[in-house]
Amino acid sequence: MEVSWLVELTVEPDRLGDFWALTEEMVEASSEEPGTLIYERSMDDDGVVHIYERYVNSETALAHLRAFEERFAPAFTALIQRRRFTLYGEPSAEFMKALTVCQPWADLIVLGVKDVENRSWRTHYRGPLGIHSSKRRPTPADVKRAEAIGGPVPFIEWHDLGPVIGRVTLIDCVRNSTSPWAEANCWHWLLEDPVSMIAPDVVQGRLGLWEFDA
């Protein structure tokens, strides 16, 4: 089953030259990847960059993401402000193994601000992890607590409550993280490679680690 995504992002005007130069390298690299069907970039009159990519199946899409993260992710992330990443198709369970997280912490994770999720329990799972937004709306106290750790929250509005809103890579589960987000007496789930996206349906969250059935 084909998998595709549509990305909306912005770039500071004085960084556009660097962005388009990097884009040329990314387009050339993607042309050599098997299973890439569409790889398009455009900018509208409001300065919003639209990226559309389509792949033969989940396996080829995941291979592309791994290659992107290894070769281009740091430079790309430094140039852009991501507004939305919407995933289409029927991605495999590897895309959609999920963890339910309350707001504002869920948004902070998928936007790359919060790099540790605190849990009372340990997991041996490592790999892609969908972040499911709890239906509970964040309170002013929640936002104030988040800002005390990470500074002003870098978004205009909250993601929808209830869907899977992004993906990260769970790289380890430890007790001794030095991240400012790590809490005492918790297992620290170390998160990397955040990607924001919105799954089409609101789903019921669950305790523990679960698989999202697209």
Image (tube, grey):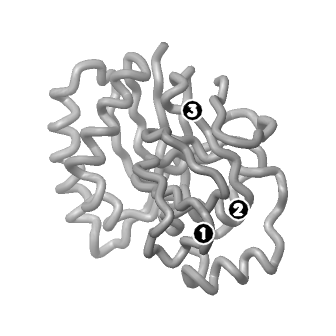
Marks 1 and 2 in Cβ contact (< 8 Å): yes
Quickly name the residue at label 2: 158
**Going by the image, does 103 lie left or right of 197?**
right
Which residue is painted at 48% across and 13% down in the image?
1
**Going by the image, does 150 lie left or right of 75?**
right
Instruction: Please name which of the two marks, 3 or 2, marks the residue nearer to the observer.
Output: 3
In the image, residue 61 above or below residue 127:
above
- 172, 92: nearer the viewer: 172
Q: Residues within 10 Å of mark 2 (few under 14, many from 20)?
A: few
Quarter in which the C terminus is drawn: top right
Tag 2 secondary structure: loop
- Residue at mark 3 to residue at mark 2: CA–CA distance: 21 Å
**Going by the image, does 133 lie left or right of 45?**
right
The label shown at residue 155 is 1
- 15, 109: nearer the viewer: 109
In the image, residue 75 above or below residue 87:
below
Q: Is residue 49 visible?
A: no
In the image, residue 175 above or below residue 164:
below
- 44, 51: nearer the viewer: 51
Which residue is painted at 75% across and 42% down in the image?
207
Q: Amino acid at mark 1?
A: Phe
Which residue is painted at 30% across and 47% down in the image?
69
Q: Quadrant of residue 120?
A: bottom right
Q: Position of residue 38 (x, y in %)?
A: 34, 27
Q: Quadrant of residue 35?
A: top left
Q: Position of residue 110 (x, y in %)?
A: 54, 56
Quickly name the residue at label 3: 96
Q: Residues within 10 Å of mark 3 (few under 14, many from 20)?
A: many
